[in-house]
Every structure is written in structure tokens, then in C-alpha cells.
Amino acid sequence: MKKNKKKKVTYGKYGYLFIAPFFITYLIFQLWPLINTFYYSTLSYYKRNGREVISFAGIQNFLNIFGLAPGETAYVLDYLKNTLIMWGFNFVPQILVSLLMAVWLTDTKVKVKGTGAIKVIIYLPSVITAASVSVLFKNLFSQYGPITLALKSLGILSQNFDFMSSVAGSRGLISLILWWMWYGNTSILLISGVLGIDPVLYEAADIDGAGGWKKFTDITLPLLKPILLYTLVTSAIGGLQMYDIPALFNVTETGYNGLPNNTTTTMAMYIMRLYNSDVGKAAAVSVFMFAVTVCVSLLLFFFMGDKEEKKLKKAEKARRKAGGR
């Protein structure tokens, strides 16, 4: 008699149903537009008087944006510099303050009371709309704003100083706004990373007589590398695509020229400005921004990657090869 074979139920296939929405959304709203951007960057695509003029241009758009064609200026490099400066002055203090907050709120010796309320308070700025924040800060720091007048009365600023007409002032305020909006989100991420570290390691360090700084540098920082890498990469991507705050804070009537004198114009603002007249050029700038983002991300992965693990893997491969001979 034939034995009845029990049917095995494979649950692995159901996992694909759960991840399918993400991949479908990614393909439709991100991958396909990205492919189209590369395609449009090879076209001479103008919008004039309600008409669209399209022809193949090859690499001409890239020659134009880098100022390699006659009569063209490499504005894209100036706007990349603006973007990197404002991102740098936002992110460096952001990561330092977030690390401090993460260590302080998770320290078992300090035992901070009301950590839940503190987390909510520091996270709240990230849920406020960019338009509201821009209007608020512009009114506070305008020439006759309350904070500007207070700083002038204390003698910190000169009587003629105006944040909106100062390059350092405008860039600094945009960086301050971005820092204020996003340091809470970064802090929450780092707090989750610190809480994921085995407390036994800290207990062993206490027994060995290690101080707070020693525990931070030898235990917390090395084990936070994965979450720090994630934070750095996502911040770099968001920073290079910086648009809403600079485009709403101190701009001309069109909204695409950052004052004073285009010193707060970002790459994304330049793309939007070009899109209204020269789609091919806008696409070329987008491709350039994509390339810069990839390069920055790869550099972060290279410098922040676990080098010891790579060495161990190489040693293991070498040992296996030697054993196979």
C-alpha cells in the first residue's frame, strides 16, 4: 500500500506578498522616473509659449551645465557648494547633539526622569510643516524681528546687520532650522541603537574600572557604527536633495533664487528653475546630483564599514584556499 505523504505547507511564499507593495511602489514612483530622467538628460527639451520642442542632444546638456559649451556657466557647481555648506553646518552639530542626547537618556547611572516626554518634545519639530517653520524663523530673524532686535540691544550684532542680506546669516539660519527640525529624529534612531547594545558589556566595563568616556569610545561608538552609517547615508541623501526650507525661507518672488545673490540656492531649487524652461538641462542636473549622491554614499560605506570583519573574511578565504590545496 502506498503511504499517504503529508503535504508540506511552505509559508515562505507569503512573505513575498508582504514585501510586494514596497517593490511595486518603488518600481512605479522611483525606478521608472529615474530611468526617464536619464533618458530626458539626452534630449534638447524646451518649453516655450505653451509648446514643447524636443530633439536628441546626446551629452550636450552635460556640457552646458558644467560650462563647457560656449556661452554657458557652471552654475551647478556653485549650487552644489551652497548645498554642501548648509548640509554640513546642519549635520555636524546634529550628530554631536544627538549622540549626547542618546547617551544621556540611556545612561542607567544618570537615570533621567521623564525620558518619554523628552523624546516626544525633541521629535515634535520634525512633524511641523516646512512652510510654518520657514515663516516663523523669517519673522523672528528679520531686520526688525524680536530675536534680531534683542541681539542688537545686547551689542552682539551691529545696528545695521540683517540676516536676510548676509550670506553667512542666511546660510546659518537655514542650517539652524534644518538642525532644529531633524536632530530629534536622529536622536531617536541613536537611542534605539544604544538600547540594542548588551548591558552586560557596560557592566563588565564598570567592573574593570572604565570611565564614562572610555565606555563611550570603546563600546558605544563601535557598536553604533551600523546605525551611524544609516544616519549618515540618509542624511547625505536628504541634504543633497535639500529644497523645502531654502525655497521658502529667503527667496525671490519666483521661489527658485535663494537670497542674497543666489548664495542659498540649492541643487534641487536649480532643477525646479530649469524645469520650467529647459527640461533636458534639468534632467542633466538631476543625473549629476544622483551621481554625487552615489559617490558620497559609497565613500561613507567605505570609511564607516567594518574593516575588521572584512579582514577576518579575507583571512578565512585565504585559509580555505590553503586548506584546499
Image (cartoon, rainbow, N blue to C red):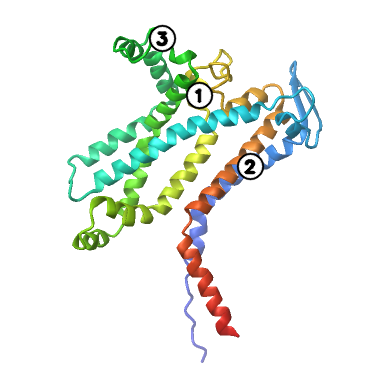
Judge left or right: residue 35 versus residue 94. Answer: right
Residue 291 got which mark? 2
Q: Residue at x 44, y 28 (%)?
A: 175
- Residue tagged by mark 1? 246
Q: Residues within 10 Å of mark 3 (few under 14, many from 20)?
A: some
- Badge 1 marks a residue whose secondary structure is helix
> Which quadrant holds residue 67?
top right
Q: Residue at x 81, y 33 (%)?
A: 57
Q: Residues within 10 Å of mark 1 (few under 14, many from 20)?
A: many
Q: Residue at x 47, y 70 (%)?
A: 9
Which amino acid does the dot numbered 2 rest on? Ala
Return the x and y of residue 151 as percentages of the image width and height.
32, 14
- Give 261 or 37, whichever is nearer the viewer: 261
Which amino acid does the dot numbered 1 rest on? Pro
- Badge 3 marks a residue whose secondary structure is loop
Residue 143 got which mark? 3
Q: CA distance from mark 1 to mark 2?
A: 22 Å
